[in-house]
Image (cartoon, rainbow, N blue to C red):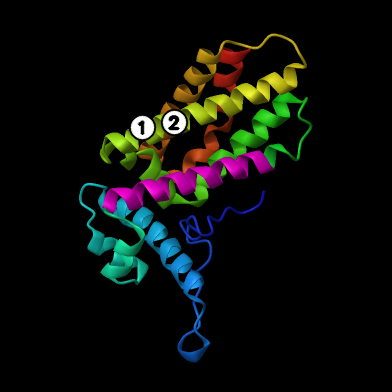
Amino acid sequence: MSRWYISVSMSAIGHSRPLRVLPRGRHAAPREVVAESQRERLLVAMADAVAAKGYVAVAVADVIERAGVSRRSFYEHFANKEECFLAAYDAGVATLLAAVAEAEAEVDPGDLAAVARVGTETYLQVLADNPAFARTFLIEVLAAGTAALAHRDAVHQRFAARLHDTYTSAAGGAPVPDADLFRATVGAIHELVVARLVADGPGALPGLLGPILEVERRLLG
């Protein structure tokens, strides 16, 4: 399985590799590259800070200290802490979905069992490899306000739509379950993942592969 990095969108959440170091002095990078690196570091720092302290307790000062950028630079990218958090959330989820899609594309789309297994395995391993991302965006999002909850709801709907599309493609024209069942399946999976994350930590999440596949089998047939 390929490693997951959120580059520009959060390249080092799981500390899989260090952040890029930009050249200084007369060899300084162009302004756009500097801005991109600052934004990247701020998104990573937001995930790390929230995972460590909880969303409510995190201040902009915590984020800029971890990111190694100035307060002025922070406000050049984001209006406030919430905006930075939502940007990090959206970027991380987009890359998570892309990682799942990439993994599923390597198996026969008509083999539903194989697609479900590799997609679920990738999802769980990405979370396990990126503990700050897992805790921040599965647990702390609940404390981040109504806008964050709306983003979370939209993400669940995206996962449900993707699951629906996967089943529809594999069905080859045969009937598939109602859309509400796919949304219910996503909710059940989410509850299992959050409960395991809280009880045993992100490293234990890959152990949910079997139970999650069983949930899908029982709810979706």
Check if mark 2's residue and mark 1's residue have beta carbons within 8 Å. Answer: yes
Q: Specify whether 169 is left or right of 189.
A: right
Report the Cα–Cα distance between label 2 and label 1: 6 Å
Q: Quadrant of residue 202?
A: top left
Report the residue marked by disc 2: 154
| Residue at 46%, 22% in the rendered image | 188
Where are the magenta residues, as a range?
81-102
Across and down, in percent, residue 92 comes to 48, 48
Relative to 137, is 215 above or below? above
How many C-alpha atoms fall within 10 Å of the one at disc 2: few (<14), some, or many (≥20)?
Answer: few
Q: In which quarter of the image is the C terminus?
A: top right
| Residue at 58%, 20% in the rendered image | 216
Tag 2, which secondary structure?
Answer: helix
Which residue in the rendered view is the most extreme toward the bottom? 26
Relative to 49, is 92 above or below? above
Q: In which quarter of the image is residue 148?
A: top left
Across and down, in percent, residue 102 comes to 67, 43
Report the residue marked by disc 1: 150
Q: Which amino acid does label 2 sit on?
A: Ala
Residue 97 or 205: which is nearer the viewer? 97
Q: How many marks?
A: 2
Q: Specify whether 123 is left or right of 168.
A: left
Across and down, in percent, residue 93 comes to 49, 43
SS assignment for the magenta stretch, majority = helix
| Residue at 79%, 32% in the rendered image | 108
Q: What residue type is labelled 1?
A: Ala
Q: Specify whether 104 is left or right of 49.
A: right
Residue 35 or 164: which is nearer the viewer? 35
